[in-house]
Image (cartoon, rainbow, N blue to C red):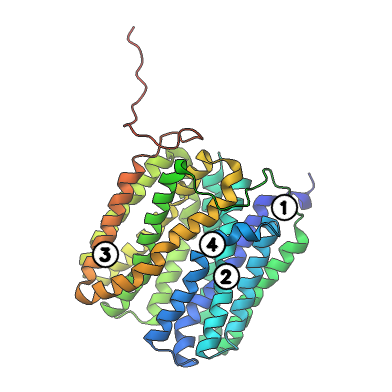
Amino acid sequence: MSPTSRFKRPEFLLFVMAAAMPLAFGVWQALLNNFAIERAAFSGVEIGILQSLREIPGFLAFAVVFVLLLMREQTLALLSLLLLGVGTAMTGYFPSIIGLYATTVIMSLGFHYYETVNQSLQLQWFDKDHAAHNMGRMIAIGSFTSLIAFGLVWLLLDITKMEMEHVYLLGGGATAAFAVFCWFYFPKFPQKVEQHKTIILRKRYWLYYALTFMSGARRQIFVVFAGFLMVEKFGFDAAAISIMFLANGALNMLVAPKIGQLIGKWGERRSLGFEYIGLILVFTAYAFVENPWVAVVLYILDHLFFSMAIAMKTYFQKIADPKDMAPTAGVSFTINHIAAVVLPAAYGVLWIFSPAAVFLTGAGLAFISLVLSRFVPVKPVEGNEVCWKKPVEAVQPAE
């Protein structure tokens, strides 16, 4: 195999796309609040509507199976990445309420459909023995380019005094350029197994669906309210939050591949149990934290535990019919986003009365996930999706 063809393999395409996505999304995320307030005169009402609109494409991710009637998954992944880049690049040039709503939906459509198809391709292209490690490497690559994105935002805005419009254009343009490069550089890889082109809900996948729903509910609590607590309770400014993001990304870049290797060694049942016990402790501690440095440590620990959610993907990879990867990726994204539509508003009301109660219910959700993880078999395979009895070690016969 020539050195050139060695890099034209499916896994390298996934690695390049993992590097490309955060360049646009990281810039969009870093600039959103400042741009919305300073250029589009947003209040809390408009921001809330924008965040709801942003989640709609994720909630409708199940529809990806219908798009796959028209094109291959690899094609859809690259077009979605291109759409993410274009939507981000356009954002700065439509500084109005309707303009920002429209560009957000375009960006989000690209982001969520890319993430949906990307998950399906990971499960199809990574072999089961090395899937967890390779998924950890993808998280590390994404964390690295997120660091680049956040660093460039700081450099371009604070040092070179570049306008936000141009920063959006550079971040989105970079992702779009990567998508075009991948289109021409990588060959069209053959599908090992033709994917079902209908929406599929299988009874034997119920445990995976349940774990996915609980994961989405927990993440919404932490994503929406953990950072908010840092600002409201401890007075963190934008610079301090950015530094926390950078530290979090740097640690994830170093640790995520090792977490993937650990999951391969421990197995899904033990890894998920460890993750959920850790999250119970993190959420409970967050409810009562009084020291800002402890809060930062808890924030970073949460993201490290989140990397262990790789085990949920590899569990499904081992139990699923290979033809179900694409439709189930879409369905699982929809299930994951059900909570995103309901929880932020509901917990926003609860926050007024008791911020601690918000995080304690998060600990309760993590406990439910821990109970569900006890049903994951020690060695999950197709036909052995759920373990209803406590696993026992093999006993050597007495001599």
Quadrant containing the N terminus in the rendered view? top right
The mark that comes first in sequence, 2 or 4, is: 4
Check disc 1 and report the residue beneath it: 7
Location of residue 184 with respect to 5 vertically, above or below: below
**Dot 3 surroundings within 10 Å: few (below 14), some, or many (20 or more)?**
many
Label 1 residue SS: loop
Give the spatial CA distance, label 1 vs label 3: 45 Å
Q: Secondary structure at mark 3?
A: helix
Q: Nearer the viewer, residue 344 or 362?
A: 344
Quadrant in the rendering for residue 131? top right
| Measured Cα–Cα span from mark 3 to mark 2 | 30 Å
User: Which one is closest to the eye, mark 1 or mark 4?
Assistant: 4
- Residue denoted by label 4: 61
Question: Foreground mark, 3 or 2?
Answer: 2
Mark 1 and mark 3 lie on one chain; the one further toward the N terminus is 1
Q: Which residue is the site of mark 3? A: 359
| Numbered disc in front, either 3 or 4 | 4
Badge number at residue 109: 2
**Of label 3 and label 4, which has the lower sequence position?**
4
Query: Vertically, is 218 above or below 36?
Result: above
Residue at coordinates 51% horizontally, 74% vertically from top-left?
A: 150
Q: CA distance from mark 2 to mark 4?
A: 9 Å
- Say which of marks 1 and 3 sits in front: 3
**Residue type (three-letter) at the residue carrying disc 4:** Ala
Using the image, determine if residue 302 lies above or below residue 133.
below
Q: Earlier in the sequence, mark 1 or mark 4?
A: 1
Q: Secondary structure at mark 2?
A: helix
Tag 1: amino acid: Phe
